[in-house]
Image: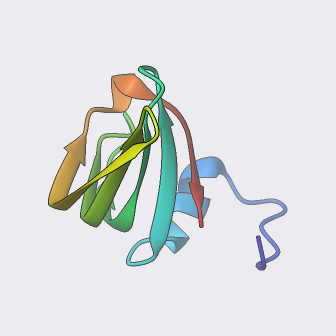
């Protein structure tokens, strides 16, 4: 990351990333990327201009809501 995020809590880093692109790895092996619009303490996320990469293919979505139970990791792009 380009920012100095030392000393920040993980949810603070996500809060800073609102409006920017993030990438999330899900339990099913999918990778999701999109513009982070909102999230909660359970890592439920609302993404816009989202795409899902799975089995070598990509599917584009306008808006996507991810259930936090499925998230393994999430990071600003």
Q: Residue at x 78, y 79 (%)?
A: 2
Q: Position of residue 19 (x, y in %)?
A: 38, 78
In this view, 28 is above or below 5: above
Q: Residue at x 61, y 62 (%)?
A: 13
Q: Position of residue 7 (x, y in %)?
A: 81, 59
In this view, 5 is above or below 9: below
Is 14 on the left-hand or right-hand side of 43?
right
Q: Residue at x 43, y 32 (%)?
A: 55
Quarter-wise, where is residue 28 in the image? top left
Judge by depth and name the residue closer to the eye, 30 or 37. Answer: 30
Is 12 on the left-hand or right-hand side of 69?
right
Is 62 on the left-hand or right-hand side of 57?
left
Judge by depth and name the residue closer to the eye, 22 or 9. Answer: 22
The residue sitting at the left extreme is: 62
Judge by depth and name the residue closer to the eye, 20 or 59. Answer: 59
The residue sitting at the front extreme is: 56
Q: Quadrant of the C terminus?
A: bottom right
Is 13 on the left-hand or right-hand side of 31?
right
Q: How many marks?
A: 0
Q: Quadrant of the N terminus?
A: bottom right
Quarter-wise, where is residue 63 in the image? bottom left
Q: Position of residue 10 (x, y in %)?
A: 63, 49
Give the color scheme: rainbow, by chain, secondary structure or one colour: rainbow
In this view, 63 is above or below 54: below
């Amino acid at each position: 990351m380009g920012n100095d995020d030392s000393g920040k809590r993980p949810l603070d880093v996500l809060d800073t990333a609102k409006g920017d692109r993030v990438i999330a790895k899900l339990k099913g092996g999918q990778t999701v990327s999109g513009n982070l619009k909102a999230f909660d303490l359970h890592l439920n996320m609302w993404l816009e201009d989202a795409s899902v990469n799975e089995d070598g293919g990509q599917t584009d979505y306008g808006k996507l809501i991810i259930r936090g139970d499925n998230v393994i990791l999430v990071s600003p792009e």
